[in-house]
Image: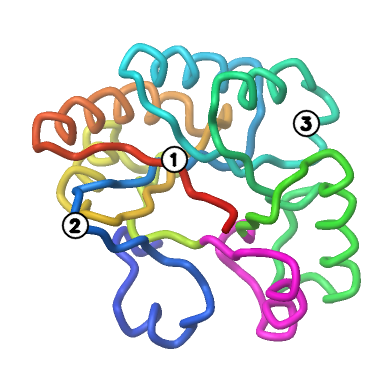
Amino acid sequence: MFLVKTPLAIKKSFPSLVWDIPNNTKTIYLTFDDGPTPEITTWVLETLKKHKIKATFFVVGDNVKKYPQIYQQLIAEGHAIGNHTYNHLNGWKTKSSDYLQNIEKCAELVDSNLFRPPYGRIKNTQIRKLKQHYKIIMWDVLSGDFDANLSPAKCAENVINNTKAGSIIVFHDSVKAEKNLKYALPKAIEFLKQQGFTFGVITED
């Protein structure tokens, strides 16, 4: 089980993390985790280009090493990039020194001070260390595209029904999410554009 909409109580419990970016311009922030993957990321880029949208990609270092051309394409097309560890580690289950070392290994390939913890799982000790160098980006809305038990339509509804100005929305450019993503992303984009939302990238400052 997962929470589609991050509760205010959780946001208030971890105020040093970025959960949303409030604004008066109806700007929202599409983010994609776990790429780059040749099967999916290139499709996402085509979809974003079609709609003239920029997004923020939290990349896994090992995938960047495997698919450097796709990583360079993300940058060349004007999308923002963030560190998502080198091996997609769960911070709760990983010794902090190993976790931080894995993030630095990713940083050798990914030049960004944006960081998102895989699974959203990170210890307070890890937060304190990372805050010295990184802006830690969480989310307001989770599409659930990674969940094989969810229908593609439900993933689209999760985004459509919970997005507000400033929302940071999570999709996954991963093989596991392909079926749900390829339905939900275009549907969500089309609906949100009709509602007057604009799409921004998360900045490093």
- Which stretch is magenta? 117-137
State whether residue 103 is above or below residue 98. Answer: above
The residue carrying mark 1 is 171
Residue at image mark 2: 24
Q: Gap between marks 3 and 2, in whole Å?
A: 35 Å
Residue name at image x 82 percent, y 66 percent: 99
Q: Can you say which quadrant of the picture contains the N terminus?
A: bottom left
Question: Which of the pair 80/60 is nearer the observer?
Answer: 80
Residue type at the position of mark 1: Phe
Dot 3: element? helix
User: Disc 3 or 2, which lies upstream in sequence?
Assistant: 2
Is 118 inside the magenta-drawn segment?
A: yes
Tell me which amino acid carries mark 3: Val
Q: Which is closer to the viewer, label 3 or label 1?
A: 3
Q: How is the image coloured?
A: rainbow
Which one is in front, 6 or 23?
23
Mark closer to the chain start, 3 or 1:
3
Instruction: Say what amino acid the circle numbered 2 marks.
Output: Asn
Quadrant assignment, res 24: bottom left
- Helix, strand or loop at mark 1: strand
Q: Position of residue 60 (x, y in %)?
A: 72, 42
**Depicted 60 relative to depicted 118: above or below:** above
Secondary structure under tag 2 reads loop
- Percent x, y of residue 147: 43, 44
Q: Quadrant of residue 133?
A: bottom right
- Foreground mark, 3 or 2, reads 2
Task: Please report contact status of discs 1 and 2: CB closer than 8 Å, yes or no.
Answer: no
Residue labelled with disc 3: 64
